Image: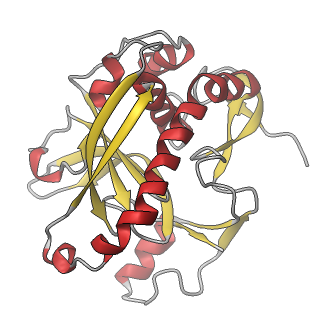
């Protein structure tokens, strides 16, 4: 396999890039996926072709969803500092869903726009490590330097609590779809020349949204999920018992292109 060179999506240095699983491999991201272009799917939807991936070209990712986005140092550091804590968090959610999801799946209220919630009790977790893993994934799925030096410093220094909470909001939800996908920071065009800057990563079973609160619009109607930004305020070595309520959603809120499990 040839080398993949480019700028690391975290530190910004030009180097050989390593494959970064998004989400981490141990967070249920080990199966091959078919990756479709969001632009092509949008064109299919405009033509009202069903299903929206019918006949489209795709790229096989045998190692699971991800890409060559991080240098070896940043990949190793995020893996050792953050990924294990995120993996434990997601796997505890998955175990809870195995016992609880049947009742929610039979709930028809989601079809009417009401989103039931699942209470997750997590004991002795490291909230900051989980939050930083999520931010590192948003960096991997966006263009280099999308978020500037702030995210870079926040991720490289595992102890850093410097995060612009007035501008950025992170929320999570339970994805009940069999699909996964992601979009980098994207301008969603709204009515009256307004737009929303937002990024989303849809995995199984967790969906994540990063909102730019400085977007020139009334952002309130578009907020969804359980807010997680307060995790960024808790020191790295602090273990917490956390109770959160996660809404269910069948698929993405903003992602037009999906990776489909083989």
The one of 5 and 50 positioned closer to us in this rendering:
50
Is residue 47 found left or right of 204 in the rendered image?
Answer: left
What colour scheme does the image use?
secondary structure
Q: Is residue 93 above or below residue 236?
A: below
Left or right: 194 with respect to 155? left
Give residue 92's position: percent from left, percent from top.
Answer: 48, 47
Residue extending furthest toward the right: 1
Horizontal side of residue 87 vs 20, given as left or right:
left
In the rendered image, is residue 234 in sight?
Answer: yes
Residue 169 in which image quadrant = top left
Q: Is residue 202 visible?
A: no
Q: Residue at x 36, y 57 (%)?
A: 174
Q: Quadrant of the C terminus?
A: bottom right
Is residue 55 depicted above or below 230 in this figure?
below
- The image shows residue 178 at horizontal and vertical percentages of 49, 72
Camera-side residue of 191 and 197: 197
Taking depth in this image into account, of 236 and 78 the one nearest to the observer is 236
Q: Nearer the viewer, residue 172 or 1?
A: 172
67 vs 183, left or right, is right
What is the count of numbered marks?
0
For residue 175, above or below residue 24:
below
* Residue at the image point whose x is 60% and y is 22% from the top: 81
Indicate the quadrant where residue 108 lies. bottom left
Residue 236 screen position, x and y as percent: 46, 14
In the rendered image, residue 197, in percent from the top left (x then y), is placed at 28, 43
Residue in the image at 52% along x and 80% along y: 53
């Amino acid at each position: 396999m040839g080398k993949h060179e480019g700028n690391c999506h975290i530190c910004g240095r030009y180097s050989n890039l390593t494959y970064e699983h998004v989400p981490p491999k141990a967070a249920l991201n080990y199966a091959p996926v078919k990756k479709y272009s969001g632009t092509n799917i949008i064109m299919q939807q405009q033509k009202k072709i069903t299903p929206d991936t019918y006949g489209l070209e795709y790229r096989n990712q045998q190692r699971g969803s991800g890409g060559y986005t991080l240098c070896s140092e940043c990949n190793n550091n995020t893996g050792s500092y953050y990924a294990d804590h995120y993996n434990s968090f997601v796997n505890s959610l998955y175990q809870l869903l195995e016992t609880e999801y049947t009742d929610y799946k039979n709930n028809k209220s989601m079809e009417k726009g009401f989103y039931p919630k699942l209470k997750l009790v997590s004991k002795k977790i490291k909230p900051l490590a989980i939050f930083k893993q999520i931010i590192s994934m948003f960096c991997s799925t966006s263009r280099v330097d999308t978020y500037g030096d702030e995210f870079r410093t926040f991720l490289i220094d595992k102890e850093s609590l410097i995060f612009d909470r007035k501008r950025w909001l992170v929320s999570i939800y339970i994805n009940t779809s069999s699909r996964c996908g992601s979009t980098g920071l994207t301008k969603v065009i709204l009515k009256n020349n307004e737009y929303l800057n937002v990024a989303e990563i849809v995995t199984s079973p967790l969906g994540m949204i990063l909102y730019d609160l400085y977007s020139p619009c009334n952002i309130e109607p578009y907020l969804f999920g359980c807010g997680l930004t307060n995790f960024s305020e808790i020191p790295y070595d602090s273990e917490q018992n956390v109770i959160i309520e996660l809404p269910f959603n069948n698929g993405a809120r903003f992602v037009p292109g999906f990776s489909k499990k083989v």
